[in-house]
Amino acid sequence: MKSTVSNLALTVSAIAACIGVAATASGQATPATQAQRAAPPTKAEAEAFVARAERELAEFSVIAGRAHWVNSTYITQDTDALAAYFGTIGTQMGVRFAGEAARMATAPGIDADTIRKLNVLRLGLTLPAPTTEGAAAELNRISTDLGSQYGRGRGRLGQEVLTGNEIEARMGTVRDPAQLREMWTSWNDNVGSPMRAPYARMTEIANAGARELGFTDTGAMWRSNYDMTPEQFEALTERLWQEVRPLYEQIHCFARAGLNRRYGDQVQAATGPIRADLLGNLWAQEWGNIYDVVAPPAAGGASAQAYDLTQLLERANYTPERIVRQGEAFFSSLGFAPLPATFWERSMITQPRDREVICHASAWDVDNQDDLRIKMCTRVNGDDFTTVHHELGHNYYQRAYNRQPFLYMNSANDGFHEAIGDTIALSVTPEYLVQIGLLQQNQMPTADQDRQLLLRQALDKIAFLPFGLLMDRYRWGIFSGRIRPGEYQAAWDRLRLQYQGIVPPSPRSEQNFDAGAKYHTAASVSYTRYFLARILQFQFYQAACNISGWRGPLHRCSFYGNREVGRRLTEMLAMGSSRPWPEALQAFTGSREISARPMVAYFQPLLGWLREQNRGRQCGWEGSAGPSPGTARRSGS
C-alpha cells in the first residue's frame, strides 16, 4: 500500500506535550511554571499559543522533512542518525504542544477554529512520547531503527538474496509453491522476527505518552482522530466491513477453487482457509497477480484478455519518467496546474543502483508550498502506471490545501488522502487508455473480457478489505494490552484467519513477528486509512462520474479531460482538514455519510457471475469473521 508524506504528518506525528512548561535539568517544573499551569488559561492565551505552535511547527517541518527525505532515499548510519535527531526534536516539540493544547482547551470562550487546532495538536501524534527524560530520544531511536531495518530487509530464493522490492515482484510471478514458501518464510523470518522486542518496547513508551495526554492507550488516541469517539469510529469501520463482507467471501471462495484446481489438495485444499503465499502478494493483501491462476477456462483465461497494460506500455516505449509525465497529464486535463520544475529535479522516480533506499512508493510535500516529490522505484508495468496516478493524487491534494494554516495542511481525514489517489487510479479504464493512445478503439473489451477486467480489480480491491481492517485491529489490541508480547504471532495468525481466511505456509512460533514484515507496522503508519480509502474511492469515483455526465456502466467511466470534475474536486481538496470530514465529503459527493454502496454497485456486474461460479462450493472457513463465526457457508444453497 502506498503512502503520502506531508510536513504536518512528519512534524506532528513526531510530536508530544508541554510548550511553555520550563523544566530544570532534572526534568522538574520550576515553581513559577507550576503556578502558571495552576492558573486557568484565558481565551487570548489559547489563541496566542496556537499561533506560536503553528509558526514553530511550520518552520521546523521543512528541515525535518528534508532530513527524512534524505534518510528514505539514502539509507546509511549517518542518515539514520540525522532522521532520529530531527525526529527526537519533533517528538519533544509535539509532546510539549500536545500537553499544553490539552490545558488550553479548558479556556472559556474559545472559538471553534481554535478548538479544532488544539485538537489537531493533541490528536495529531502517531507515537507520543511521555515527558520522562530520555523517552523521546529512545522512542525515536527505536522508530528509526525499525524503519531502516525494513528498508535493509532481505529474503532468499535458493542462493539468491532478494531485496524487498525484488521479493515483492517475485511473489507475484513465481508459481512454484516450494519457492513461494521459501521467499515468504525467509522475508518474514529475516525482517519481522528481529523487530519483536523493540516493537514491544516502543509500544510501552508510546502508551505512557498517550496516557499523559488523557487517552487509555495509543490505539484509542489513533481512533480519536476522526471527528467522533473511538467507540463510534470502531463501530463505523465494523459497519462498513459488514457491508462489503459478502463480496469478499465470494472472491475468497472463487480464488480458493482456482488455486485448488492449479495446485491440488496437497498444496491448497478445496475447503477451509487459503495458504497465504499462494495469493500473489507478499502479505496476501491484494490478489490480482494470480488472475492467470484462478481465472476459469470458461472465462477465456489470461490469453483471451482484452489487453495487457504492461505490454501496451512496453510497445509504446514508455519509460519510468514518461509514466510519471502521463500521470501529470491526467491532472492537467482536469485543469490542475503542471507540477513544478523542482518535482522533476528532486523526485526519486527509479531505484538508484549505488545505495539503499526505501522503495515503498510515497508522495512528499517538503516545504508546505510547492516542493512536491514522489519516491518510487518505478518499473514499466501496469501496476506502477496505476501507482503513479495514485501518488500524484497525493501531490495535487497537498498543493490544493497549501494556502490553509499549517495545522490544516492535511486531508479531511487520513482516508481521504489515500482515497483521492485511488479515485484517480480507478479512472485508468479502457476509455482512458484509448484517449491517451495506448489502446485502439478496436481493442476495447468484449462483454466477457469486461468481466475479466472487473475480476482482476476485485482480486485487488475487494481482497484487500479485511487486511486493511485487521492491520490496525491487531495493533489496537497490542496497544490496549488485549494482545500481550508473549502472543504477538499467535494473535496475528488468529486475526488473519478470522478476517482473511488465510494461514501461513510454514510453522510459526512466538519467536516470529510477521506483522513487522509489513512496512506500515515497522514505520508505525496507521492502516485503517487504507480500509476507509478503499470504500471512499468508489464514493468519490461515482460522484466524479455523475458530475461528468457519464451514462455507461460505472466501472467503465473515465472523467479524463472534464474540467468541472477538476473544479469540484479542487473545492474539496482545498479545504484540507479545516472542517470535519463529513462536510468535505458532502462538498464533493452530496452525502455526509461514508457508504460502501458505490463499491457494491461498481462490482455488481461481477457479483452475480461469482455466485454462479461458486454454486455448490463450500464457501467460508472455520473461524471466519461473519455473524456466525466458525460456520462454513455453502454458496447457492
Image (cartoon, rainbow, N blue to C red):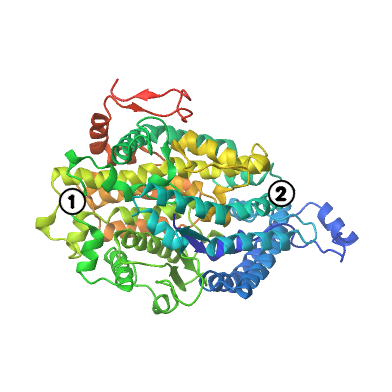
534 lies left or right of 327? right
Q: From this viewpoint, which residue is outermost toward the top?
A: 637
Rendered image: mark on residue 303: 1
User: Is residue 539 among the parts visible in the rendering?
Assistant: no
Label 2 environment density (alpha carbons within 10 Å; few <14, some 14–19, many ≥20): some
Quadrant for the C terminus, please. top left
Number of numbered markers:
2
Is residue 77 depicted above or below 200 in this figure? Answer: below
215 lies left or right of 541? right
User: Is residue 537 among the parts visible in the rendering?
Assistant: yes
Query: Mark 1 is on which residue type?
Result: Ser
Towards the viewer: 171 or 217: 171
Q: From this viewpoint, which residue is outermost toward the front?
A: 159
- Residue 357's spot in the image, x, y percent? 50, 69
Query: Mark 2 is on which residue type?
Result: Glu
Circle 2 residue: 204
Tell me which corner region of the image, top left, top right, bottom left or bottom right, holds residue 424. Answer: bottom left
Q: Tell me the CA gap for discs 2 and 1.
A: 53 Å
Rendered image: mark on residue 425: none
* Residue at 86 percent of width and 56 percent of height: 34
- Residue 39's spot in the image, x, y percent? 82, 53
Q: For mark 1, give the secondary structure.
A: helix
Towards the viewer: 443 or 165: 165
109 lies left or right of 587? right
* Residue at 47 percent of width and 31 percent of height: 625
Instruction: Select label 2 or label 1 by which is in front.
Output: 1
327 lies left or right of 70? left
Label 1 environment density (alpha carbons within 10 Å; few <14, some 14–19, many ≥20): few
* Residue at 72 percent of width and 52 percent of height: 205
Is residue 60 depicted above or below 177 in this figure? Answer: below
- Residue 208's spot in the image, x, y percent? 73, 49
- Residue 66's spot in the image, x, y percent? 56, 73
